[in-house]
Image: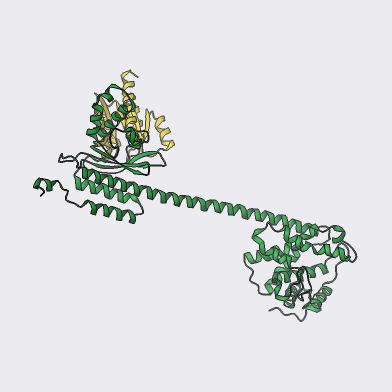
Chain colours: A yellow, B green
Amino acid sequence: MSKLLIVDDEVEICEFLKSFFEDRDFEVAVANGGSQALEKVAAFHPEVVLLDIQMPGMDGLQVLKKIKETYPKVKVIMVTAVETQEKIEEAMRFGADNYITKPLSLEYLEKDVQDKIDILAKGF
Amino acid sequence: MPTKADSQDIPKFDYQEVLRDVARSMVRLKRPERLLKLITRFIDRQFGLTHTSLLVLDPKKGRYVFVNSKGAKRLPVGLVKFDIDHPLMQWFSGSKKKLPVQKDFLFLSDVKKMLSRAEFRMAANSRGDLLAGIQKTMQNLNIELLVPGYFKDTLVGLLMLGRRVNGRSFTTQEVTFFQTLAHDCSMAVKTTEYNQNLIEQNQELANRLEEIERMRAKEQRTYYEIMRSLAEEVHAKEPYIFSHVSEVERLGIMTAREMGIGLSGKTKDLLSAALVLHDVGKIGIPDSILCKPGQLTPEEWQIMKTHVEKGARILEPLTDFKKVREIIMAHHERFDGNGYPRGLKGDEILIEARIICVVDSFHAIVSSRCYREGHSIDYAIHEIQKCAGAQFDPVVVDAFLRALKIELQKKGEVPSSLAEYISK
């Protein structure tokens, strides 16, 4: 089973996406903040992380940087409500594997997560 | 007589009453968000569903987004969007004729039934793909029933309803009720959108008008500057130390002030423009007449007199200064009625024109012209006084001489002829 970590400060979003991906046979963990996300990455070993950029405290960009420093193989998809070019460029510089803006298309989200899993399966 | 079981099936509220409430709210509410929230909450409470969610079209972005969601399995508002080409939207936006069921609503169970039919399984046709996409979405979002809301032919939104917590299915009456509410929501959304567009369009129009007004004012200013240069040009060949135009302007303003004419903003601009431009029509008079050293022949006088109308005509594009044209038309009228072109008399002549008449004559007498030397101030004062009541308005003459006295006093050069004048 593929492992997915969902990071968002909004509990409802986490719950919704968790059940969405669980229905698709993913093993899902959630984190509601930056430091919790880093703990989960260390303990849960996700293959893909869905990471919200805007979070109180440690924001998504800082979390991304730390994940990529320690676990460069983990695929990280940034999720952002406001599409600001600077944030996206910064995320890409820190090694984000893609970004998706909210509101998002569920079909696209599913496909993108699956793509990352497929890439990992091929050993990249 | 209804059985006890039947009466339990009748909901504990009056549909008509609810719909009337909604209609009343629609009229009252300027923003539809509150009404949509009200409807969502109402359905959630009355029917006990896993969730009640409202998806609404964002026409500017061409996509559908959730605006409300209630219930235990509610959907996070703002997370999910549906583009207009999503199977759900295609299904409800498509023509009714193509659809095997009434497109007014869609049960998950009906979608499943349609998919299981051989025709859809055998042929991988587009309707089969569409239904597969719809089924997937309904399952993802735990939707049992979809009710569309239209405005004219536009799919404005979808009412998405989860399962009943008690497991009962929806009655026909209930579905009809949902359809009415979905329709009301669409009306509210669309009406507000129209209002909003109207407000935005009005604002844009106001901005454009402002821009046009700015450009027009600038154009008028430019035209005025050109006219001023033209007016200066009329006297260019004359050896004035100061520009005749500027001097006449200064003396005229001075006189108007002395007369107690309120000179602020537009009034002053008008008087200034008239003083500056009064002889601009002379640009159309041949130099042979304009600078003739001797007396003009009667024919030459006729031509000379046309400078009044010529000036007024040249200034026609200066629409901001319509009155200036009237003043210029009247600046050769005489107080006694013997002037030209119309022979106006006394108060019939605009006060600005009466002022121009005096100050222009005074400055012409003291200045050197191409055909003669200038006269002394004393001589000019005497001439002006002599003509008060005939060529000139005596009140204006009085005010002018008082103002002139004050000016000369400052220089310490008061001529004896002005001794009697005491400024008010």
- Residue at coordinates 37% horizontally, 44% vertically from top-left? B152
Quarter of the rendering occupied by the C terminus of chain B? bottom right
Which of the pair B355/B206 is nearer the observer?
A: B206
Occupied quadrant, residue B290: bottom right
Residue B333 appears in view = yes
Q: Residue furthest right?
A: B294
- Residue at coordinates 27% horizontally, 24% vertically from top-left? B119
- Residue at coordinates 69% horizontally, 55% vertically from top-left? B223
Asked if A121 appears above or below B12 in the picture, the reply is above
Residue A6, horizontal then vertical, whole percent: 28, 33
Asked if B386 appears above or below B1 in the picture, the reply is below
Q: Residue furthest left?
A: B4
Residue B242 appears in view = no
Residue B121, horizontal then vertical, whole percent: 27, 23
Which of the pair B199/B401 is nearer the observer?
A: B199
In the drawing, does residue B200 fall left or right of residue B19?
Answer: right
Residue B383, horizontal then vertical, whole percent: 82, 75
Asked if B274 appears above or below B2 in the picture, the reply is below
Asked if A32 appears above or below B238 in the picture, the reply is above
Occupied quadrant, residue B255: bottom right
Residue B419, horizontal then vertical, whole percent: 77, 80
